[in-house]
């Protein structure tokens, strides 16, 4: 009965988070206890780094001595800057700018808003229900060549060895 007080009631976390605490975790719940340990470890690392900088050491030594927990967040990239920095023909930068466009989804032929119901063609454009077929939007994708290649790969030419005549 270590997680109960003298009256038999469970011990609540001392941080008032609403969970039950234990004597082993200093009357804290497991989450609050882990957070406390993490803060203590970070404080020790910070104190060690200040001491080493004052004594003339380098920051690399401090980082190698202690473990550092780093969380990586999302990184935003400015596509206009990236396009300006790319050297080459202008078609490459135009392609990058069109892929980075985050406006409403519109049909490539009639510019009608399609939202989530748009159809993506193999040519890479988005179309409404009326223009989703390749013959309706003058698709540059060559379906016949792709079909010929698929048939050629699935049906290799087999030649039998010639038999000797008697």
Image (tube, rainbow, N blue to C red):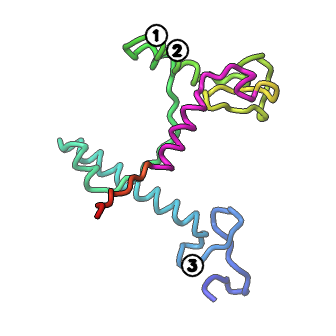
Q: Quadrant of residue 9?
A: bottom right
Q: Are marks 1 and 2 in contact (CB under 8 Å)?
A: yes
Secondary-structure class at tag 2: helix
* Residue 59 belongs to the span the image colors magenta: no
Rendering coords of residue 95 (x, y %): 53, 19
Residue in front for this viewpoint, 64 or 109: 109
Rendering coords of residue 151 (x, y %): 54, 44
Q: Are marks 3 and 1 in contact (CB under 8 Å)?
A: no
Secondary-structure class at tag 3: loop
* Residue range of the region highlighted in magenta in the rendering: 132-156
Residue under label 1, please give it: 90
As drawn, 48 above or below 146: below
Q: How many marks?
A: 3
Residue under label 2, please give it: 94
Rendering coords of residue 8 (x, y %): 72, 87
> How far apart, in angstroms, are the residues tagged by discs 1 and 2?
6 Å
> How far apart, in angstroms, are the residues tagged by discs 3 and 1?
68 Å
Secondary-structure class at tag 1: helix
> How far apart, in angstroms, are the residues tagged by discs 3 and 2?
64 Å
Rendering coords of residue 54 (x, y %): 23, 42
Residue at image position (30%, 61%) is 165
Q: Crowdedness of circle 3 by 10 Å Cα count: few (<14), some, many (20+)?
A: some
In the image: residue 109, left or right of residue 62: right
């Amino acid at each position: 009965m270590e997680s109960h007080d003298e009256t038999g009631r469970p011990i609540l976390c001392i941080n008032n988070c609403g969970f039950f605490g234990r004597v082993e975790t200093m009357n804290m719940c497991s989450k609050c206890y882990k957070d406390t340990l993490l803060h203590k470890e970070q404080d020790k690392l910070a104190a060690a780094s200040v001491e080493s900088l004052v004594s003339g050491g380098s920051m690399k030594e401090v980082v190698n001595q202690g473990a550092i927990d780093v969380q990586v967040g999302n990184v935003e990239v400015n596509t206009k800057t990236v396009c300006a920095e790319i050297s080459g023909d202008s078609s490459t930068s135009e392609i990058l700018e069109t892929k980075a466009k985050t406006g409403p989804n519109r049909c490539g032929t009639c510019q009608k808003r399609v939202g989530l119901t748009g159809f993506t063609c193999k040519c890479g454009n988005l179309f409404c229900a009326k223009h989703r077929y390749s013959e309706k939007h003058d698709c540059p994708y060559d379906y016949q060549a792709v079909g010929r290649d698929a048939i050629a790969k699935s049906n290799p030419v087999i030649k039998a060895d010639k038999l000797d005549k008697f």
